[in-house]
Amino acid sequence: MRVDVGVIGAGIVGLATAFALRERGASVTVYERGVPGNGMSGGESRILRHSHEDPRLVALARDARMVWREWEERFGGELVSRDGVIALGAGAVKRLPDLLAAGIQAHRADPHELAERLPLLAPYDGPATIDEDGGVIRTRAAIETLIDALRSDFTFDEVLSVRVTPGGGAEVRAGGVVAGHDRVIVCAGRGTPALARGAGQPLPVRQAAHVRLTYAVREEPPARLACLQDGDAGAYADPLPGNAAFAVGLGDAAAHDDGSVADASALPAYQARTDAYVGERLTGLAPEPIDVRHCWVTELPWSADALAVWATGPLLFVAGHNLFKHAPLLGRTLAETALGGELPADLHPHAKLGAPRPAV
């Protein structure tokens, strides 16, 4: 039986899902109101890290990395670097056993190794680890490759509502479209909660705004640069293609339920904090940012890394944060579910995927 599926949202999760559906012979329509890959998936880079509070997410990131490598073979280009991820702070060391148990190449790092792998970092002698299997995701290369593969499947319009029809199918209503599908998968980022609520499925999503700044590397760009997760400061940083610039993020500005930023001064304040952090911790970067990227954050209440999928008849609603690294595997899972498979137990909301384990 040929299955017709609507995918709402052309960020990395929606694109990966549509690509997996096409691979499995389904008919696909991808609905996107703006530029594909330019919302929550926008920017030049993301970090593929395995370190998480929940061991299930460690395994998910590991398995997703394998699909990234499959994509590299298929599309003929690097999508995830092999330069590793440095994590600072006691939490990184605490999570190290879970990485090793999952087969991840990781170890504690001393100050000499930190200086070698991330020469932009100011001298640091605290607890640190290196995830050798992690690296920076080449986001634009990934997005553009998937867009090329799906170019004939796009409908550029704003979706107003989705619903289960009396006959058990799924209906999408966009600006100039009324379309019926066998299944609909909603991967619309901050637009997902509104569409879910309209279909009778409220989601416990918290919204926030994030500022991500890019700084130039002071000296000749190193041939290799690891990504950074700084648990002490709550910051992250990763190299852009060519290693001549580094993107740094630190903190989110809270938003109201209607999606408006609660305090308009919060984003400039976080930008100033990021500048100060770079001046103190990443001394190999020039102090003035050369680029800025703002994006929305959608988090579930049990973890900043949480992920869940709500099923309402033929409708699937995907919500969570920090999903880019999981996208190739998550897309395959959503495609298989839409084509009649069972949604994995860990993706059901009650499983609270991403929640920290209780302290013993």
Image (cartoon, rainbow, N blue to C red):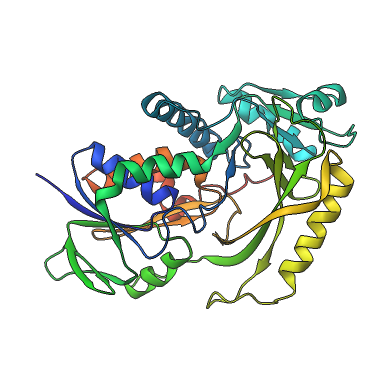
Q: Quadrant of the C terminus?
A: top right
Q: Position of residue 66 (x, y in %)?
A: 45, 27
Q: Quadrant of the N terminus?
A: top left
Q: Residue furthest left?
A: 1
170 to 285, vertically: above or below:
below
Q: Position of residue 142 (x, y in %)?
A: 45, 40
Query: In this orientation, does residue 343 appear?
Result: no
Q: Which sits in the foreground, 85 or 118?
A: 118
Q: Residue at x 81, y 59 (%)?
A: 273
Q: Which sits in the foreground, 338 or 343?
A: 338
Q: Which sits in the foreground, 306 or 328?
A: 328
Left or right: residue 126 versus residue 15 is: right
320 to 44, vertically: above or below:
below
Q: Residue at x 87, y 41 (%)?
A: 283
Q: Residue furthest front?
A: 220
Q: Position of residue 30 (x, y in %)?
A: 29, 55
User: Hey, which quadrant is residue 216 in on the image?
Assistant: top right
Q: Which sits in the foreground, 123 or 198?
A: 123
Q: Residue at x 54, y 74 (%)?
A: 259
Q: Residue at x 81, y 27 (%)?
A: 114
Query: In this orientation, does residue 91 appear?
Result: yes
Q: How many marks?
A: 0
Q: Position of residue 286 (x, y in %)?
A: 83, 45
User: Hey, which quadrant is residue 191 in on the image?
Assistant: bottom left
